[in-house]
Image (spheres, grey):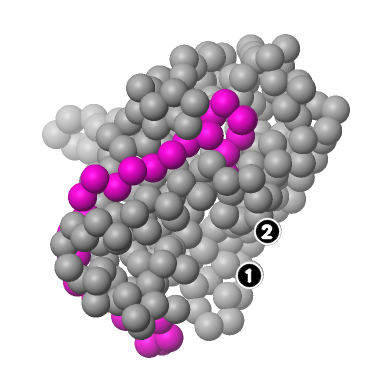
Amino acid sequence: MFLTLLNFINLNVKYINNTEDKKVHLNSKNLDLFFGKNNIFNYKNGFFFKNLLNNSSEIDDHFLYNSRYLINMLIYQIIIKKIESNFHFNSNEYLIKIKSNDFLNKNISFNYNQSYKIKFAFCILSKDKNNNLLYKNENLILIFTQTYLYSKQEWINNFIDYQINFNVTKNENINYFREIFEDSLTPENKYDYTLNNLENIRENLSIFLTNLYANNILNNKSYWLYNDYKIKANVEYYKYLGKIIGKNNFSEFLKEYLSLTFHFLDNPSIKVNINFIILVKLV
């Protein structure tokens, strides 16, 4: 979900080269040099927009909000691959933020096989109590071209994969699915979440995920694009994997393994089956 740099190895007795040899330290000077030569990025592939002729009537604030979120995810993944390939970079020490600026408005959508210049800002901060700004660049461009239109089956396969793989922690393979379940767990029902495969807990988790991808509220818990592409989640099975204490001991989480199905609300036969691990937060 993107761009990778090839790792060339010359199996010569005297010379062995790999990408590690070419990596430099992550600092503002080296970032300036890198983005001085690499300020334009390209994406040509399938994506999640309908053809302009078919989606212009659906261009509203909701679509614009979530389109921007999807594009930001795309840019982030392109940039993080570049940073990891070119710099000595530890994701536990730094925080990367991406913000696209003016690529969408109510009069513009994306047409199939047409290129768009999307200006975006990039900044990197230290992961400490101060979150000190290490570097910022507001003059970067993504040349975006959607060269392939998904069928609905391809769309849901790729969309759910895109969502799930965006925020997976490398050390424990935990997925935050854009956000942690912030409203599911209370002191009263906490014990139930530690018991495997209870029907009421499966229902709670199913409702939470369905609300992310099928409700009609424009806020940070609504990520669907089109009325006929709303997605319902059904948790078939869950297993309690243990408890995790958050940073600074401020939060408590239960770690859950989920086996579930996502399908379109208007066509349950188009579906995808997924297994992943998620955290449920005690509120």
Question: Which residue occupies 72% across, 27% down?
Answer: 58
Q: Is residue 122 left or right of residue 210?
A: right
Residue 136 in view? yes
> Was residue 146 drawn as part of the magenta stretch in this picture?
no
> Could you tell me residue 219's position as x and y percent?
66, 55
Q: Spot the residue most to the front.
A: 200
Figure check: 41 above or below 52: below
Q: Secondary structure at mark 1?
A: strand
Q: Which residue is mark 2?
A: 136
Three-letter residue code for mark 2:
Lys
Are the residues at dot 2 and dot 1 in contact (C-beta closer than 8 Å)?
Answer: yes
Q: Spot the residue most to the bottom.
A: 249
**Circle 1: is it few (<14), some (14-19), or many (20+) Cα within 10 Å?**
some
Q: Is residue 208 left or right of residue 36?
A: left
Question: Which residue occupies 54% across, 29% down?
Answer: 229
Q: In this view of the protein, which residue sits in the foreground, 62 or 184?
A: 184
> Could you tell me residue 23's position as x and y percent?
41, 49
Q: Secondary structure at mark 2?
A: strand
> Could you tell me residue 81's position as x and y percent?
44, 43
Residue 140 in view? no
Locate the C terminus by quadrant. Answer: bottom left
Q: Which residue is mark 1?
A: 133
Q: In this view of the protein, which residue sits in the foreground, 74 or 267?
A: 267
Please provide the residue range marked out in magenta.
223-252
